[in-house]
Image (cartoon, rainbow, N blue to C red):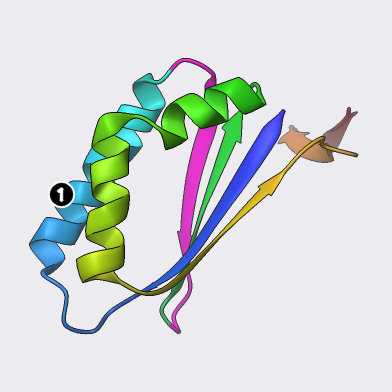
């Protein structure tokens, strides 16, 4: 598994409708891309945002990175949307564990 962390802060003067349309389209497009395992997005009250995308492989990540519509959105983001951004790619996953509540107990899982 390969994980891409996309941290960003939006400019104060962006066209919010254009941003929401572009971001929504990228989420939909990535969700349809082979090798994308999951996508999660988070925002903090101070304006920092984070997208976490899990890929099956480095090849799947490269296919997404180089998708023509995504390349256009990246350029538009640098030009019009982002005050700052950072991408971190991590592989391999060293450890993954968690739990899920079922009834009165949390069942744990590990990888």
**Residue 41 % position (x, y):** 46, 52
Residue 76 visible in the shown view? yes
Q: In the picture provided, is 25 more to the left or to the right than 38?
A: left
Q: Which residues are magenta?
A: 34-46
- For residue 13, which quarter of the picture? bottom left
Q: In the picture provided, is 94 more to the left or to the right than 9?
A: right
Given residues 92 and 109, the one toward you in this image is 92
Tell me which residue sits at (64%, 21%) in the image. Answer: 56
Q: Is residue 44 magenta?
A: yes
Counting every numbered tag in the picture gives: 1
**Residue 2 % position (x, y):** 68, 34
Extreme residue in the top direction: 34
Tell me which residue sits at (19%, 59%) in the image. Answer: 19
Task: Name the secondary structure under disc 1.
Answer: helix
Per the picture, the main secondary structure of the magenta-coloured stretch is: strand
- For residue 33, which quarter of the picture? top left
Q: Is residue 9 above or below residue 33?
A: below
Tell me which residue sits at (31%, 41%) in the image. Answer: 71
Position of the C terminus, as image quadrant, is top right
Residue 104 visible in the shown view? no
Given residues 73 and 108, the one toward you in this image is 73
Q: Is residue 56 above or below residue 62?
A: above
Position of the N terminus, as image quadrant, is top right
Q: Is residue 42 magenta?
A: yes
Given residues 57 and 19, the one toward you in this image is 57
Report the residue marked by disc 1: 21
Given residues 10 and 98, the one toward you in this image is 10
* Badge 1 density bin: few <14, some 14–19, many ≥20, Cα 10 Å: few
Tell me which residue sits at (46%, 15%) in the image. Answer: 34
Q: In the picture provided, is 40 more to the left or to the right than 110?
A: left
**Residue 101 % position (x, y):** 74, 37
């Amino acid at each position: 598994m390969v994980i891409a962390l996309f941290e960003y802060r939006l400019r104060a003067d962006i066209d919010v409708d254009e941003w929401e349309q572009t971001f929504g389209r990228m989420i939909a497009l990535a969700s349809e891309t082979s090798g994308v395992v999951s996508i999660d997005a988070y925002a903090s009250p101070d304006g920092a945002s984070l997208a976490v995308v899990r890929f099956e492989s480095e090849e799947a990540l490269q296919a997404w990175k180089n998708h023509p519509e995504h390349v256009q959105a990246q350029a538009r983001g640098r030009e019009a949307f982002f005050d700052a951004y950072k991408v971190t790619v991590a592989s391999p996953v060293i450890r993954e564990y968690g739990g899920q509540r079922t009834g009165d107990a949390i069942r744990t899982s590990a990888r």
